[in-house]
Amino acid sequence: MKKILSSLYILLLVCACKKEDKKIQFYHWKSNAKISVVEKEALKTTKAEKTFIHYFDVVVSEGINQPVSVIQDIDTFFNEIEVVPVVFISNSVFKGNSYGINSLVDKVENLVQQIHQKYFNKKAIEIQIDCDWTKTTKEAYFQFLKLLKKKIQVSTTIRLHQIKYQKETGIPPVDFGALMLYNVGDLSDFNHNSILNSKIVSQYIKNHTNYPLELDLALPLFSQVVIKNKEHNIRLINRVIEKDFKNDTEHFKNIGNHQYLVLKKKLYRGQYLYKDFVLKLEKTSIEEIVKSSEIVKKSNLNIRNTILYHLDETEIKELNFKELITKL
């Protein structure tokens, strides 16, 4: 009996340790990284030791690679935890471009270090690159990563299609990846949620699915308004505040399935909405987040930690945040 009890105790202890080892981290993706009381509480609740902060984008402008959307300020609170700079690079930067990669590496790394030194008074030791590379851009992108890795520890974001079609898209030469489990659907399809859909996830990730890199699992903690005009062009507004539409019957008509028809012209959060535009309000339920993450965890992918995209007071308040954390 004593042996049975001892074995049971050890089993419970091992399970408890595994649960404690589970780490939840955050992305911060705003131009001003000031932090609210609610956001601080979220970091404390999850015992987050690391935050991935978006520093800037690199895009092609007038034929030249340019940094844009550079972060304007970072709260001193982030000195208390590890910060990993994130740089988004448009795939067009690498199209037909195997030249100038050395220069691009130097410019990206130098700007990252300038920003990091300014706010943290030290050099960054890790960087994450966010790029939706393809078969045609992988050579230039992978060369960029190889050269950057000589200067600093590097990770990169991985999309679902890059897991499923890894033979075509290749394996990036980095230390680890972050599997993006959001923006999985088609924005123009107003019958389904484009942020996260477990049925779509299951089309890309099977029980036997594997990948040669360790991966963090990035899950959505955001909402958006998808705007479709008369020509079916798509625009986005970050964050859904449903009462703005539900209560304003002069300008919006609820047509079901989280969609609203614009009845008359209105300026809404900096964007003009015209008559007959259709709006789709997209949020992600805890049930869908858990269901999708379970599909990934049941596969042969080597999952490390969870990263929530992103740290935002409004989104945290809209969701039962503590329930989500307990179920991840």
Image: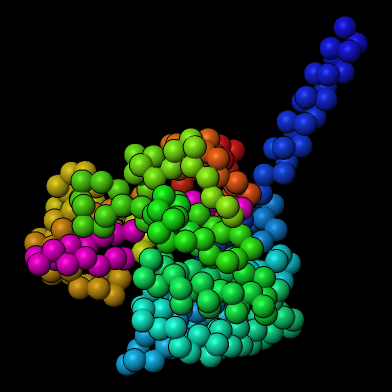
Snapshot quadrant of residue 263 = bottom left
Left or right: 278 as drawn, with respect to 123: left
**The magenta segment:** 214-237
Q: Nearer the viewer, residue 45 or 287?
A: 287
Q: Quadrant of residue 205?
A: top left
| Position of residue 164 measured from the top left corner of the image (x, y, whole percent) | 41, 50
Q: Is residue 236 magenta?
A: yes
Q: Residue 327 location in percent, x, y?
A: 56, 37
Check the image and report above or below for 101 versus 165: below
- Camera-nearest residue between 51 and 199: 199
In this orientation, does residue 317 appear?
no
Q: Residue furthest top?
A: 1
Which quadrant: the N terminus?
top right
User: Which residue is pictured at 30% across the width and 71% down the height?
Assistant: 269
The secondary structure making up most of the magenta span is strand
Q: Is residue 77 above or below residue 164?
A: below
